[in-house]
Image (cartoon, grey):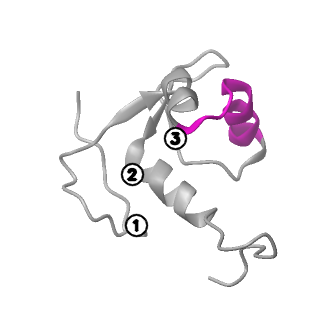
Amino acid sequence: MPKLKQHQEHNYNCDPKDTQLFTAEELAQKIKLSEKKLQTMRVQGGGPRYFKLSKGRRAPVLYDWKDVLVFLESHKRISTSDNGDNQ
């Protein structure tokens, strides 16, 4: 598999060679969301970054675990009144 280009805007605390990729099905199970919800987030935006490996509706989609962690961290809250603006 070819090396994946690292994005400058993220500062990861792990070795860039340590990339873990998940299919939508695998990720949905891992983070307790439905595949349909991940698909909706891909269409509407606001979800974790992903790779689309070719053109077309049925093209394989993969998620890098580091990008998923960034997404999850951005949704962390400290109370029910926390709307996420206090970051």
Determine the image quadrant of residue 22: top left
Q: In which quadrant of the rendered view does residue 2 lie?
A: top left
Q: Is mark 2 on a helix, strand or loop?
A: helix
76 lies left or right of 21: right
**Distance in Å between CA atoms under marks 3 and 2:** 11 Å
For residue 66, the mark is 2
Q: Which mark is first along the chain, 1 or 2?
A: 1
| 41 within the magenta span | yes
State which tag comes first along the sequence, 3 or 2.
Answer: 3
Q: Nearer the viewer, mark 3 or mark 2?
A: 2
Above or below: residue 57 compared with residue 78? above
- The residue positioned 55% from the left and 38% from the top of the image is 31
Amino acid of disc 2: Lys
- Which quadrant is the C terminus positioned in? bottom right
Q: In this view, does 25 lie above or below 8?
A: above
At x 73% / y 80%, what residue is drawn? Answer: 85
Three-letter code, disc 1: His
The residue at the point 37 percent across, 68 percent down is: 8
Q: Do the residues labelled 1 and 3 touch (CB within 8 Å)?
A: no
The residue to which callout 1 is attached is 10
How many marks are shown on the rendered structure?
A: 3
Q: In this view, does 23 lie to the left or right of 80?
A: left
Q: Which residues fall within the magenta stretch?
A: 31-43
**Which residue carries the number 3 mark?**
50
User: Are dots 2 and 1 in contact, CB under 8 Å?
Assistant: yes
Q: Residues within 10 Å of mark 2 (few under 14, many from 20)?
A: many
Q: Position of residue 75 (x, y in %)?
A: 64, 62
Q: How many other residues sit within 10 Å of disc 3, few (<14), some (14-19) or many (≥20)?
A: some
How dense is the environment of label 1, judged by Cα within 10 Å: few (below 14), some, or many (20 and up)? Answer: few
x, y percent for residue 26: 49, 24
Which residue is at the far bottom?
A: 86
Q: Distance between the residues labelled 2 and 1?
A: 9 Å
